Image: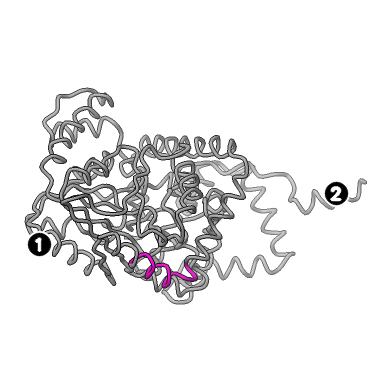
Amino acid sequence: MSHPNLASIFNKDEKRVDWHDKALWFVRHKRDRTVHNVKGWESLRDLGHGIKAHTLSNIDNYLIQFEQNALKNGVQVHWAANGEEHNQIVHKILKEHKAKKIVKSKSMLTEECHLNPYLEADGIEVIDTDLGERIVQLAKEPPSHVVLPAIHKDRHQVDELFQEHLGTEPCDGDPQYLTSEARKHLREKFIQADAAITGVNFAVAETGGFVVCTNEGNADMGVHLAPVHIACMGIEKIIPKQEHLGVFLRLLARSATGQPITTYSSHFKKPRNGAKMHIIIVDNGRAEQLSRPDFRASLHCIRCGACMNTCPIYRRSGGHSYDYTIPGPIGSILSPGKDLKKHSSLPFASTLCGSCSDVCPVKIDIHSQLYKWRQIITKETPQPFIKKKSMAVMGKIFSKPVQFEKIGKVARWSLRNLPKSVINSKPNAWGKTRDLPKGPNQSFDDWYKEREQNK
């Protein structure tokens, strides 16, 4: 299904749309208040952008350097060309260690590779230990946001889920009680785990170490209790030096949730005594995206979710309407590179207002890239007949000033005088949920000419 069709399903529940919109805008507002208190915030963004651009231009050298240093640290390094190979490597490691119970911290890469169902098909239990991830796992749904995976569910829905799957008492959605019960449930899973899987936020070529950022400490709980740690990272997570972490850790949490820093920024470098550590470095289409000059900057993304929190389309359509692991504006750039036909509607799920680019901590020109994808999609995929004809008509109207002026007068008169039942009739999809403004008495052009004459 296309984005408009999936969004229409989300929009059937108007109350959910309202609180989803407000919740994400609240996070965006927290981001604004926090970054405005950081002296030199724009310089910090420039620095993050520069480091990422430099790294991507030399990514082969930095990945090799990372592997060499990780091996020196006693870490086993694996390379995966795609999601299937990644899953096979994880499965092989688990079989070698006879691991049947797995705890996993939040990892968008493993979601992208569909690791959970792959392992579960072989009878391996995989428990997502991030609270939001556990909620959507119990609901048998994918995450709808890269930082707030269960933002589409309210506390009463979580209450019902926990009653069904964890045997909790009805609590009218009491967050304190639900969190306490989740802790009890997950504590047992941590203790029983045979292996822990984490994502990677940043991998440092200089040291062969990596950093995992969480607010709940669940990654640490899993890694420190389980005898095997498997870290899964996309090739774009590499940064050159340890000193660069200071830039990205300051950018990440402020952009994501308005915090000065994540509660836990956990550094992993070598396995502890008696334990094993594996790192899987995954491509899965990233090298191909890197080869596209217009879209390679999308690999700068540090998965903060700021573009989603500010996007008026995402806030009112929900993450599942994108039908892709990474939703929102950044996902709308990444997804056509994976499957142009399937995701051809996503670059059009944008007002091109540029707010996503304004808040991006590493200054990805998101709205410009969405516009460029539109040009490619329009040329390479069949477009609806009505859309092609309407755009051709609009092109002719805009190209003839006299004709444009006449139609403008008719439109302004109509907005002032026709009843709402006519203005908001079926052809006007905009009128389903909002009114068009009252038409002005004159056009901007008329107003400007009159102003100049009266000077």
Q: Is residue 50 above or below residue 272?
A: below
Disc 1 residue type? Glu
Q: Is residue 434 left or right of residue 107?
A: right
Instruction: Determine the residue positioned at 53% across, 58% down.
Output: 364
Report crowding for label 1: few under 14, some 14 to 19, many 20 or more residues within 10 A (C-alpha).
few
Assess whether residue 4 is covered by the magenta stretch.
Answer: no
Which color mode does the image show? one colour
The residue carrying mark 1 is 96
Place of residue 453 in the rendered image (x, y in percent of width and height, measured from the top left): 91, 50
Disc 2 residue type? Glu
N-terminal of the two: label 1 or label 2? 1
Give the SS element for disc 1: helix
Instruction: Determine the residue positioned at 65% across, 66% down.
Output: 397
In 3D space, how far apart are the residues under numbered discs 1 and 2 (Cα atoms)?
81 Å
Instruction: Determine the residue positioned at 55% across, 35% down.
Output: 33
Decide whether the magenta segment is chiefly helix, strand or loop.
helix
The residue carrying mark 2 is 450
**Residue extent of the magenta highlight:** 56-67
Residue 425 visible at all: no
Q: Is residue 70 left or right of residue 204?
A: left
Report crowding for label 2: few under 14, some 14 to 19, many 20 or more residues within 10 A (C-alpha).
few
Quarter of the image with the N terminus is bottom left
Name the one closer to the observer, 68 or 385: 68
